[in-house]
Image (cartoon, rainbow, N blue to C red):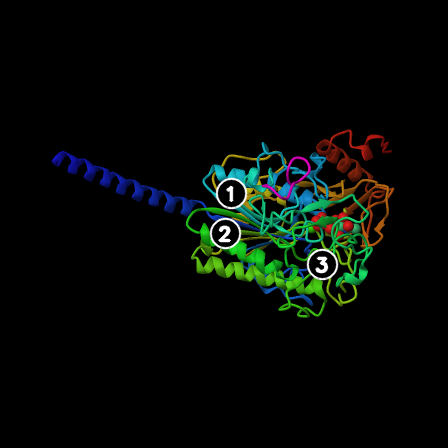
Amino acid sequence: MNKTIFSSLKITLLSLLFIACTDLQKKNNKEIKPNIIVIYTDDLGYGDVSAYNKGALNTPNMDKLANGGIRFTNGYASSATCSPSRYALLTGTYPWRNSKAKILTGASLIIDTTEMTLPKMLKTVGYNTGIVGKWHLGLGLDKIDYNSNISPGPNQIGFDYSYIMADTQDRVPSVYIENGDVVNLDKNDPIEVNFKEKNDYGLPTGLKNPELTTMKWHHGHNSSIVNGIPRIGFMKGGKKARWSDIDMADHFLEKAQDYIKNNSDEPFFLYYALQQPHVPRTPHPRFEGKSGMGPRGDVILEADWCIGELYKTLEAEGILDNTLIIFSSDNGPVLNDGYYDDAVEKLGDHTPSGGLRGGKYSLFEAGAKVPFIAYWKGKINSAVSNKMISQIDLLNSISTIVSSNIKSSDGQDLSNLIMNNEGEGREELVLEATSRTAYRNGDWIMIPPYNGDAVAKFVNIELGNSLEFQLYNIKYDTKQENNLALKESEKLKEMISKFVKIRGSNFSNIKNLKLE
Ligand code: NG6
Ligand code: CA
């Protein structure tokens, strides 16, 4: 009898000791390993954040991060469009190495499930990982069946939790997907999606029934109408599952807040991928008319508010001073990206590109140079850095911050720059825009010759195409107005040879080139 009591006492004591140790371990983990949040906006320009460009638009919550942390003035997305930038952010690999990393529409997953990713790396050191918001990296292996669990997707490349829209707000299916399952799907009203079918398929279309639209399409975007908005692609069924566009920001915010609350006592990684200010711009009525710039300005104010609310959640959970926040955008700004929404007409004095040349889709600076902020209350001192940093460096840098050895080969470890504003940034970087590439080294940018329109017809953005080589020194010529290719032929040669070293000698625009 005594022996039994003694042994159960022993077990109890051991269990208590174990629990105490695990708690201590958790606490230690917490001290060493910060929560990490990447706040990623969609098509937000270098000049859309007032900390970068004082002017007509006020973004106090983005500014709070910018002014309280390190505001990088030479921070880059890996591409001037979405899917390639997102691919690079998550893998630390240049998007032009992956032929599938182009703007996706209903595509299968472009990250191999064996590939290393930012969330996978964080899982190896004990993190819980979640994504809320825009995915746009493809789903499934072949044709996606939205009526059963969709796999592979975010949950197969490193996220413990996912609450996403598949591609973009302007593409069907207009539904949310949670851990692979369409939210609120009625099995009796299955979803079918088609991006090729042009004749009567599913919902009325913008092309045939413009009278049913509340937002008019300008180019593209004339297929299935959902909530009065004509989209890219055709959709059938899934009536109960369809999202409400004006509530999307609140909805994603709530999911992001829930994720934080549910995981606040273990180290977590949250990739919060906001949909704004990508088209269609559908501010909640609370924000309608607030910017005086039409829906594009209004949704930027809405996104700014969401960031403020997320910040408050971190404060309320008592974890703000243990959370590293990276804020950035997937590519530069665009005004008319396919709908008549007053973005051009009501712009006024605001400059979304912050005076840089080009915009979304462009090889010029405004294509990929974006707001880029590192904030950690009490740990990162406020500073402005002009050192060059790219989103492909986040995997390697965060890896060091959380004491992991996992690194990608394209990325650089810029943890010292992010944490202490010390050390050098990148010396060189390959820029990408709609499958074209250019090269920056130091203050020099070289754009090789490309065929194609100089200005994208509908969106009215200079793409960077020219039959001549372009060479700019952005230290003296931030607007890239002065092509030095002829004057600085030695520099040009040096830039080409360095570029070819990374890009590969079979890069078609360089291959047959005779420089003399
Ligand atoms: C383009 C769409 C554009 C936008 C873009 C993706 C047309 C004419 N244009 O094909 O509106 O959806 O794809 O943007 O359909 S991104 O930010 O996700 O890369
Ligand atoms: Ca984008």
Earlier in the chain: of badge 3 and badge 2, it is 2
Q: Residue at x 19, y 40 (%)?
A: 9
Earlier in the chain: of badge 2 and badge 1, it is 1
- Crowding at dot 2, Cα within 10 Å, few <14 / some 14-19 / many 20+, comes out as many
In the rendered view, tell whether residue 36 sits above or below residue 294.
above
| Structural distance between the alpha carbons of marks 2 and 1 | 11 Å
- Crowding at dot 1, Cα within 10 Å, few <14 / some 14-19 / many 20+, comes out as some
Q: Residue at x 16, y 38 (%)?
A: 5
Residue 488: x and y in percent read 81, 42
Q: Which mark is residue 259?
A: 2
Say what amino acid the circle numbered 3 marks.
Gly
Determine if the magenta segment contains residue 283.
Answer: no
Say what amino acid the circle numbered 2 marks.
Tyr
Q: Is residue 264 left or right of residue 398?
A: left
By secondary structure, the bulk of the magenta-drawn segment is best described as loop
Where does the magenta region start and end? 139-149
Earlier in the chain: of badge 1 and badge 3, it is 1
Q: Is residue 321 left or right of residue 439?
A: left
| Structural distance between the alpha carbons of marks 1 and 3 | 37 Å
What is the number of callouts on the image? 3
Quarter of the rendering containing residue 247: bottom right
